[in-house]
């Protein structure tokens, strides 16, 4: 059994000790620099307000598990969770619409949530202003976590199973040898460890620095005040009965504490603090995770509060704090084993709300090799290098603080700092009027204004105001023009690696489901599975030479996953930034490319899923005959220095064929029509290849990770499936993630959604129960407060015979 050291006894550390010892991993020591059970971290003063609704299914599940766990454990006979419910209130029509959208997100994650009228909200919370409310989002199972008490209960339970908690013990250094952790040095001597889990919250960057790890986590101060007992609350005798409240429109939240109210405020400017400057108890009386209250930043909070809770006009503030907690560059926590040091794990930037769920996933990960829930959004190894710079972490962290309650469109990019990464095609894309969104830090055109003229040829149905954001009808025109002619797509953001060296083939055959024993020049679409047969990624493996593979992967997580498993003779190299890619797709793609090379590009010479190294004009390229948009054509790769030359070469050759530059919008629409899954959106580690419709990508026989589990699955007895839904009304466009209903009940949720411009209908992929997955089944999609009818359709909708691709 491994020796495990947990750093920090906040909600995450205590819950993790509980979950590990429950699974029989009892050689656990929790080191805490403060006193138990109120050591002075963020958990020690958090009001513990829990709202489960979240745009991420995984985060919502973490919250649901936290509520269930805290509600089930008792401190002196009382549950550690007060299920008082929550209300998010709307005072504007825009916010009311947003609450409908949030209700949908919550429902699709299995959380009981509904929008209620003002009178119902007033009954639940009589202090609310009667005349300004338009409605509220009500989640009956939300409430208040009694986090410190829960820490004690979970900690004592872990101790009863053999864990040790050492208080007043500060970790000062991490010991390592040959790329593995071996233990920690503390103010109370050294502790050996095979596994160290840093649950240090806002001090996470400081612990990271001990091993040379930069953590994308920014501590920020946040203001919270408590009122004196209020006469309006005089009749309440328990800790809390009123639902917790959010008034996002004014950056406020509220909870009851007996006869007082707590008022939390995000309306002030961001107040970042450096982790290394967070010192214990300075000035005296403050917890280490607090900095002195700054009344100038509180200005306006009470006036805005009184607009929705009039009783607060007279209320006196008796306790006030600037409390520190963590923000990250993308709002997700940091979880998992850091790729830079074996045995060094992290569980940080976690709210109380998600604490127990995160801890459970961490324990499963450590004990079983992978968690039950999909954690790719939270993986500590997900970041691009540029995201790990101090300036970036501070700027994006601060921006996420500002936007914490903002009404954000799912496609909305941050405005600053941008641009960060640009491909060599950027100047040309700007000349063509590219409308850019950000992808992995790269500027990536969504469409090109230069194609506006195509609208005369291709009409495009109108959309509602929400789905029209970050969208243009030009997207539709581009998609159709590519299907009829040829388009140029920038596919540089697709991650690329090289796997080379002695044993590369055997290594990849173990790691992937592909049959890779093919002659150089072959391309194979295959999967990475975990031991339980869950999908970790879908990739394309291009065999360039006997021991030379070029692989298109989905994320940095894939790269670290392959690298950590590679034997010493096999090199895994990320070549994304050093190379660029263009997709030349459409029925005329071959004619364009053929003008640029004397090599025969005919179907016999360079068939579907084959690659060729050649020159297009002056530019050395790798031509790969595959297409995520489902048309004849090539992915074309070259080195970054030749980007502009490649673009210009293709552009010139394409003019007589009507070549257009096409953006990501058209790309997505075409991908969805062709039914190609997008990892992380359509499927993830919670799904097996049969359910996801990807069993064709798994080779017969075994020898790959996950084979036993995969072979044990009965494809005739699946409980759910990924299906293609077709909406009949062309004006009913949805965005993805909405709940799917059947006979008034939520039965599933959408993954990707887009308008299919060639088939002329909106499309959406969705996870639904197997019993509702047969073609022709009628379902409804809840979009804001509307029900849109949809039918399970053929998958894929476009070119199921593959005639376009293979000709
Ligand atoms: P912590 O509770 O900070 O625990 C980390 C522990 O690590 C600390 O006890 C620390 O002493 C210890 N440690 C650090 N370095 C070392 C070292 N070198 N050696 C030994 N020990 C070390 N979240 C919600 O979900 N709902 C809310 O309503 C809410 N409100 C909040 C209001 C305020 C004012 C603040 C500041 C935060 C709020 N949060 C809320 C956020 C929440 O409090 C935190 O995200 C959460 O408590 C973090 O838990 P943790 O276990 O990761 O960290
Ligand atoms: N291009 C490359 N690599 C990639 C992607 C890509 N890796 C990550 C991601 N995208 C993988 N996704 C897909 C999805 C489908 C296909 C390729 C990559 C594809 N599928 C064929 C099909 O299902 O019809 C496979 C046919 C076959 O196996 O013969 O083309 O966009 N380089």
Image (tube, rainbow, N blue to C red):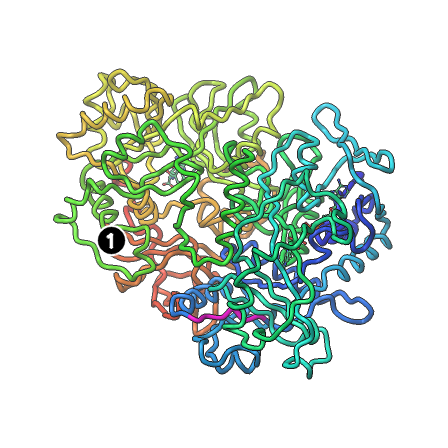
| Neighbour tally class for label 1: few under 14, some 14-19, many 20 plus, Cα within 10 Å | few
Specify the farthest residue to the front.
Answer: 296
What residue lies at 53% left-to-right and 29% top-to-bottom? 508
The image shows residue 715 at horizontal and vertical percentages of 51, 52
Q: Is residue 667 left or right of residue 540?
A: left
Q: State whether residue 375 appears in this view.
A: no
Q: State which region is magenta.
A: 86-91
Of residues 804 and 27, the one drawn nearer to the viewer in this rendering: 27
Q: Quadrant of residue 722?
A: bottom left
Looking at the rendered structure, the secondary structure element under dot 1 is loop
Where 370 falls versus 143 (above or below)? above
The image shows residue 23 at horizontal and vertical percentages of 76, 50
Of residues 770 and 418, the one drawn nearer to the viewer in this rendering: 418
- Examine the structure image and report whether residue 362 is included in the region drawn in magenta: no
Q: State whether residue 115 appears in this view.
A: yes
User: The C terminus appears in which quarter of the rendering?
Assistant: top left
Taken as a whole, is the magenta stretch helix, strand or loop?
strand
User: The N terminus appears in which quarter of the rendering?
Assistant: top right
Q: Is residue 145 left or right of residue 691?
A: right
What residue lies at 62% left-to-right and 76% top-to-bottom? 242
- Mark 1 = which residue? 759
């Amino acid at each position: 059994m491994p020796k495990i050291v947990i750093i920090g006894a906040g909600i995450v550390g205590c819950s993790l000790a509980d979950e590990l010892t429950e699974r029989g991993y009892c050689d656990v020591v929790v080191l805490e620099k403060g006193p138990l059970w109120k050591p002075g971290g963020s958990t020690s003063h958090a009001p513990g307000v829990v709202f489960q609704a979240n745009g991420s299914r995984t985060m919502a599940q973490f919250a649901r598990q936290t509520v269930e766990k805290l509600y089930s454990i008792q401190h002196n006979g009382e549950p550690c969770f007060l299920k008082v419910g929550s209300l998010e209130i709307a005072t504007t029509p825009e916010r009311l619409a947003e609450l409908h959208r949030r209700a949908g997100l919550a429902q699709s994650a299995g959380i009981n949530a509904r929008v209620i009228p003002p009178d119902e909200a007033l009954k639940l919370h009589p202090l609310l202003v009667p005349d300004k409310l338009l409605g509220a989002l009500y989640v009956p199972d939300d409430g208040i976590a009694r986090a410190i008490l829960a820490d004690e209960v979970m900690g004592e339970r872990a101790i009863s199973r053999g864990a040790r908690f050492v208080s007043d013990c500060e970790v000062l250094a991490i010991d390592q040898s040959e790329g593995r952790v071996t233990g920690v040095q503390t103010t109370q001597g050294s502790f050996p460890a095979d596994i160290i889990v840093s649950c240090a919250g806002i001090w996470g960057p400081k612990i990271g620095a001990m091993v040379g790890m930069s953590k994308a986590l920014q501590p920020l101060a946040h203001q919270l005040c408590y009122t004196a007992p209020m006469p309006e609350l005089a009749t309440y005798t328990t800790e809390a009965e009123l639902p917790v409240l959010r008034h996002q429109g004014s950056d406020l939240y509220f909870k009851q504490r007996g006869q007082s109210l707590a008022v939390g405020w995000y309306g002030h400017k961001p107040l970042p603090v450096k982790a290394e400057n967070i010192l214990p108890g300075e000035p005296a009386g403050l917890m280490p995770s607090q900095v002195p209250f700054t009344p100038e930043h509180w200005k306006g909070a009470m006036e805005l509060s009184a607009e929705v809770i009039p009783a607060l006009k007279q209320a006196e503030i008796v306790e006030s704090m600037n409390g520190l907690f963590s923000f990250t560059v993308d709002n997700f926590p940091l979880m998992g084993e850091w790729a830079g040091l074996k045995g060094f794990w992290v569980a940080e930037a976690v709210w109380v709300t998600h604490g127990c769920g995160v801890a459970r996933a961490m324990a499963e990960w450590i004990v079983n090799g992978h968690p039950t829930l999909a954690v790719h959004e939270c993986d500590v190894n997900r970041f691009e290098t540029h995201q790990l710079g101090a300036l970036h972490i501070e700027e994006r962290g601060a921006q996420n603080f500002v936007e914490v309650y903002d009404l954000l469109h799912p496609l909305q990019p941050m405005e600053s700092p941008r641009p960060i990464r640009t491909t060599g095609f950027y100047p040309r894309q700007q000349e063509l009027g590219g409308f850019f969104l950000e992808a992995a830090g790269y500027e990536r055109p969504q469409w090109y204004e230069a194609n506006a003229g195509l609208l005369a040829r291709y009409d495009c149905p109108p959309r509602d105001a929400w789905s029209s954001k970050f969208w243009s009808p030009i997207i539709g025109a581009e998609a159709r023009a590519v299907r009829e002619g040829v388009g140029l797509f920038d596919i540089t953001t697709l991650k690329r690696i090289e796997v080379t060296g002695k044993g590369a083939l055997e290594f990849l055959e173990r790691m992937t489901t592909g049959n890779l024993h093919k002659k150089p020049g072959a391309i194979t679409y295959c999967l990475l599975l975990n031991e339980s047969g869950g999908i970790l990624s879908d990739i394309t493996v291009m065999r360039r030479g006997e021991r030379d593979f070029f692989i298109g992967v989905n994320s940095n997580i894939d790269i670290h996953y392959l690298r950590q498993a590679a034997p010493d003779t096999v090199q895994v190299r990320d070549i994304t930034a050093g190379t660029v890619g263009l997709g030349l797709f459409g029925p005329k793609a071959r004619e364009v490319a053929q003008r640029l090379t004397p090599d025969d590009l005919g179907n016999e010479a360079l068939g579907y899923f084959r690659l060729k190294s050649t020159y297009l004009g002056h530019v050395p390229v790798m031509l790969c005959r595959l297409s995520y948009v489902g048309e004849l054509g090539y992915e074309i790769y070259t080195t970054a220095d030749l980007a502009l030359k490649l673009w210009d070469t293709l552009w010139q050759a394409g003019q007589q064929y009507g070549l257009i530059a096409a953006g990501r919008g058209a790309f997505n629409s075409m991908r969805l029509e062709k039914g190609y899954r997008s990892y992380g959106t359509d499927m993830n580690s919670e799904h097996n290849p049969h359910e996801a419709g990807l069993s064709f990508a798994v080779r017969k026989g075994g020898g790959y990770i996950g084979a036993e589990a995969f072979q044990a699955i009965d494809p005739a007895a699946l409980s759910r499936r990924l299906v293609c839904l077709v909406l009949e009304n062309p004006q009913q466009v949805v965005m993805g993630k909405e709940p799917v209903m059947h006979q008034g009940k939520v039965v599933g949720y959408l993954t990707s959604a887009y308008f299919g411009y060639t088939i002329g209908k909106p499309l959406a992929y969705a996870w639904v129960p197997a019993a509702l997955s047969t073609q022709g089944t009628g379902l409804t999609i809840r979009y804001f407060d509307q029900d849109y009818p949809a039918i399970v359709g053929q998958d894929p909708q476009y070119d199921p015979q593959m005639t376009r691709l293979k000709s």
